[in-house]
Image: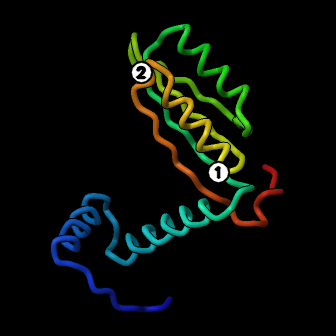
């Protein structure tokens, strides 16, 4: 482990400490390590074009036409939708989780197309990369 000092405005540190406590971190150090990992993942995502992964969380109204369009967007995407999990939240709302592999451009394009479908109420993209050697690992 390497130690280093950081200058930070007091109000920002206070908000950070509140988040650290709320998330039950053992201390600031572990929370900072997580924040750095997230920052690096985003930076690598922005720099690289291949081997990227993402999950897309979608909440939408349960309507057959909307569901048909959602499936069509996945099938016509320039990326590989590895899995799709569909959950009935209420009588009128569904949650769908897509696991996606492809270029960051293709993943972003699919996420934007899905978010623009009328009836999609929430759409959130989480991107990540795997270390080089993990790509060929099989379970």
Q: What element carries label 1?
A: helix
Residue 111 picture location, percent across and down: 56, 37
Q: Do the residues labelled 2 and 1 touch (CB within 8 Å)?
A: no
Q: Give above or below for 5 relative to 26.
A: below
- Residue at the disc numbered 2: 89
Residue density around tag 2, few if under 14, some if 14–19, many if 20 or more, within 10 Å:
some
Q: Residue at x 45, y 74 (%)?
A: 33
Q: Residue at x 73, y 37 (%)?
A: 78
**Where on the picture, by quarter, is residue 64?**
top right
Q: Residue at x 22, y 74 (%)?
A: 13
Query: Distance of mark 2 from mark 1, alpha carbons?
Result: 29 Å
Is residue 87 or residue 44 the one in the foreground? Answer: 44
Callout in the foreground (2, 1): 1
**Where on the picture, by quarter, is residue 112?**
top right
Q: In this view, does 87 lie to the left or right of 131?
A: left
Q: In this view, does 138 lie to the left or right of 12?
A: right
Q: Residue at x 54, y 69 (%)?
A: 40
Q: In this view, does 102 lie to the left or right of 40?
A: right
Residue 93 picture location, percent across and down: 41, 17
Q: Is mark 2 on a helix, strand or loop?
A: loop
Residue density around tag 1, few if under 14, some if 14–19, many if 20 or more, within 10 Å:
many
- Residue at the disc numbered 1: 104
Q: Give above or below for 62 relative to 56.
A: above
Marked residue nearer the N-terminal end (2 or 1): 2
Residue 90 picture location, percent across and down: 38, 16
Residue 8 picture location, percent across and down: 25, 80
Is residue 126 or residue 29 the one in the foreground? Answer: 126
């Amino acid at each position: 482990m390497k130690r280093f000092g950081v200058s930070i405005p007091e109000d920002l540190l206070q908000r950070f400490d509140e988040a650290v406590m709320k998330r039950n971190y053992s201390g600031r150090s572990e929370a900072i390590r997580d924040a750095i990992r997230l920052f690096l993942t985003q930076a690598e995502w922005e720099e690289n074009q291949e081997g990227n992964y993402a999950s897309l969380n979608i909440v939408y109204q349960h309507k057959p036409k909307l569901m048909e369009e959602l499936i069509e967007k996945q099938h016509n995407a320039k990326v590989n939708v590895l899995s799709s999990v569909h959950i009935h939240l209420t009588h009128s709302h569904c949650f769908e989780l897509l696991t996606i592999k492809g270029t960051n451009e293709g993943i972003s394009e699919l996420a934007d197309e899905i978010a623009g479908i009328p009836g999609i109420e929430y759409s959130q993209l989480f991107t990540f990369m795997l270390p080089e050697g993990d790509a060929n690992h099989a379970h």
